[in-house]
Amino acid sequence: MHSDQTMFLIICSALVLFMTPGLAFFYGGLVRASSVVSMMMMSFGSLGLIGVIWVTYGYAMSFGNAGSGHYVGIDGFFGIDLNALFLNDLMSTALRFNDGAGLAFAGFQGTFAIITVALISGAIADRAKFGSWMIFAGLWATLVYFPVASWVFNFKSVNGKVVDGGWLVYNFHVLDFAGGTVVEIASGASALALALVVGKRFGFAKGMHAPHSIPLVLIGAAILWFGWFGFNAGSELMADGTASIAFMNTGIAGSGGLLAWVIYEKITLGKATAVGAASGAVAGMVAITPSCAYLDPIWALVLGLIVGVVCALAIELKWQLGFDDSLDVVGIHLVAGLIGTIFIGLFGRGVGLFFGYGPLQLGRQTLAALVVGLFAFAMSYAIGWAIQKTVGFRITSTDEIAGVDSVIHGESAYSETDPRWSWGRTER
């Protein structure tokens, strides 16, 4: 009855779900004090909306059985399994056979969808309407995440060999263990598109806003690191040797990324920052996500060290290129996701070019990264542009200066900045 597997997936699902509040802390600490509520609400809004959509039809789009006779769409590319709506097929199995592994898997994958959507919000901090963000989140999940998840995650294997499923893994034999393409590259490319659509913050310039709470950033990074073990090791779907390799590589890549980033800062800036340490750890874990089961620990460490420096350099590009990716989703998630996905073709166990296996897998990994990145960028730009031209995506510059929290949510993160609290104190 797969009771051990079911429990393993339930625990890993809880870990991954905890990552979304962790992301809210991480992003919330990086923005201005007058934008904290708005920033954190984008993550919590995603948690609510995508959670509902996933159960309703998201799972049916991402993991529908094209051979079930109830599938509507193009097999392996885009479609929906009508029998899987509201998880009907999984509920039936759980009740009839007392086997909840499939239902636990659906919950596990749902947490992936939630945090992937939330990641994008960092690119439009300080200037987006909450309602417009929620519209974007729902459309993006439907038109980008669910199809790409089907391309990458929805496959069947026999004796370790993929025999059916989404076209990237089945037809092109791409390796992506825990979502470097569908989670990291897709969110990073979409963040770039949305940043271009929404436009720059008022007074956009280097050093315009310092993080308002570094302790919040570190708390968020710690929660993300904790949850990432469930994210990567849980993708094995059972507690075995492969899950252990993924667990170990996740930790060592995060450590390598942290160390490389702070050393780079010490050399170039003269000071190692806490925000840099947190960003380096996240970059390392982003990069290891697709490759955590395919690398030996030494190469996981090398990967972490590489992205710790490269991503530190990449976040400077927005100032040269003139796009306002507020919290560096592009510089960390897109760049580290690309490196981690392609790295498999170079140093992957049994497939890597540097181990004498030729350039074929490298080409497959590069193709997958480009296809997912371009698809996500184009679709996100179109969705964001349509919202901007209809209901509007960003607040006015006047409201932006006043603070998005009070304008959009009527709340303040800290009582000292709330005019109602200050007025009451003056009266006393």
Image (cartoon, rainbow, N blue to C red):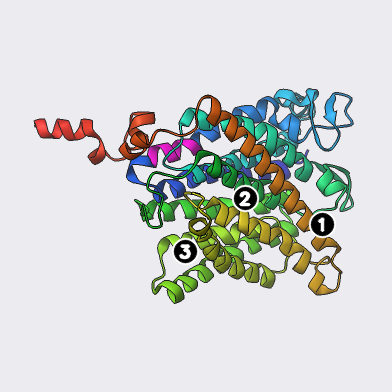
Hey, which residue is sitting farthest bottom in the picture?
A: 267
Amino acid type indicated by mark 3: Ala
Q: Main secondary structure of the magenta part?
A: helix
SS label for mark 3: helix
**Dot 2, crowdedness within 10 Å: few (<14), some or many (≥20)?**
many
**Dot 3, crowdedness within 10 Å: few (<14), some or many (≥20)?**
many
Q: Residue at the location (70% across, 26% down)?
A: 57
The tag on residue 230 is 2
Is 98 on the left or on the right of 15, as rendered?
A: right
SS label for mark 2: helix
Q: Residue at the location (48% across, 73% down)?
A: 263
Residue 39 on the magenta segment:
yes
Would you name the residue on which mark 1 appears?
364
Would you name the residue on which mark 3 appears?
277
Sequence-first disc among 3 and 1: 3
Magenta span covers which residues? 36-43
SS label for mark 1: helix
Q: Is residue 335 above or below residue 140?
A: below
Is 38 on the left or on the right of 391, as rendered?
A: left
Q: Quadrant of the C terminus?
A: top left
The image position of residue 200, as x and y in percent, is 46, 45
The image position of residue 196, as x and y in percent, is 55, 44
Q: What is the spatial separation of the Cα atoms under label 3 and label 2, in whole angstroms?
A: 22 Å
Q: Does any portion of residue 238 appear in the rendered image? A: no
